[in-house]
Image (tube, rainbow, N blue to C red):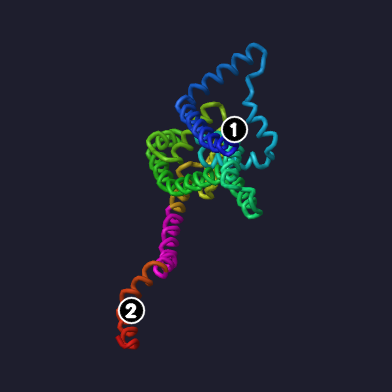
Amino acid sequence: MTPTVWLLIASIILPLTYFAWTLIGVDRASGRLIQSRLAAASAQQAGGSPAGPHWLVLLVRRLTPTSYVSRLDRMLGNAGRPATMPLDRLLSVKPLAALGGALLALLFGGTKSPQAGLLSVCLTAACYFLPDLLIYNSGTKRQARLRLDLPNVLDQLLISVEAGLGFEAAMARVGTSGKGPLAEEIVRTLQDIQAGSTRRDAYKAMAARSTVAELKSFVGAVIQADVQGLSVARVLKPQADQMRIKRRLRAEEKAMKLPVAVVFPLLLFIFPPLFIVILGPAVINTIATFSGR
């Protein structure tokens, strides 16, 4: 068989194999995590070192700049660190995606002309940065959901604290009864405190995992109240009022932007058919009259 046929077969088999491995890995991720931790603990007790990552991950980490790896780690943190795409897997997927894009470009004649070569390079770069775009999109949606859920969570915390619960008990109640990324962040913060981290460090870590300015402001106010010994209810009440005001202002801003956003669909999709329906018969009659038919 010719090399083109082999490349075509490889471009079909390799993605299917990877996706099958991904599905199997998702189903058994927790079991592998437990086994790896047990193996690491037993290796440390025996005086050895735990098993390192895969050679592909080591190679990719060595070739990838440290600043870029840190940026990817922050993007994964903003996206909630999905279990199906940890940092090592993301670093391994990117060169494989770029290789798949290069093979696809070669199959369609990527070296026949300079324009085709430039298109091949662009396709390879696009496939390499495609996982970044997907993670960034997921993180943006998650941060928007955090900003949307924050006023309601603050109201629930304020009601629970005013009812007599402690702040951590109120957080536990809101985290266990709520849904969404903010409830998950609250539960994770409580788990950090139970694991031995100080409340100040746990709150700062929750703020660092988000890009929402309102959440950072709330965490700063809670830390200040904890340091100065102030009542948490006195801090939560102005924070909740401020979040409700900001939510109303954002809704008013979106309502003001709506007429401007509607102009372009009107000009492109509504006015042309309307003009055709209204002026079409008149234009046809005018043409028929001047042509003498």
Query: Closer to the N terminus: mark 1 or mark 2?
Result: 1
Q: Tell me, yes or no, whether the two marked residues, 1 and 2, touch with CB atoms within 8 Å.
A: no
Which residue corresponds to the image point at 45% horizontal and 27% vertical from the top-left? 27
Task: Relative to 189, say whether 253 is above or below.
Answer: below
Q: Kindly state the secondary structure of the residue where label 2 is placed.
A: helix
Residue 194 showing in the rendered view: yes
Residue at 33% x, 79% y is 279
Residue 203 on image: x %, y %: 54, 38
In this rendering, the label closer to the viewer, 1 or 2: 2
- Which quadrant of the view contains residue 61? top right
Q: Amino acid at mark 1?
A: Asp
Cα separation, mark 1 vs mark 2, equals 62 Å
Which quarter shows the C terminus?
bottom left
Helix, strand or loop: magenta stretch: helix
Q: Is 168 one of the magenta-colored residues? A: no
Looking at the rendered structure, the secondary structure element under dot 1 is: helix
Name the residue beneath numbered marker 2: 279
On the image, numbered disc 1 is attached to which residue? 88
Q: Position of residue 90 (x, y in %)?
A: 57, 36
Q: Which residues are magenta?
A: 244-267
Question: Which one is nearer the viewer's eye here, 73 or 153?
Answer: 73
Quadrant in the picture for residue 205: top right
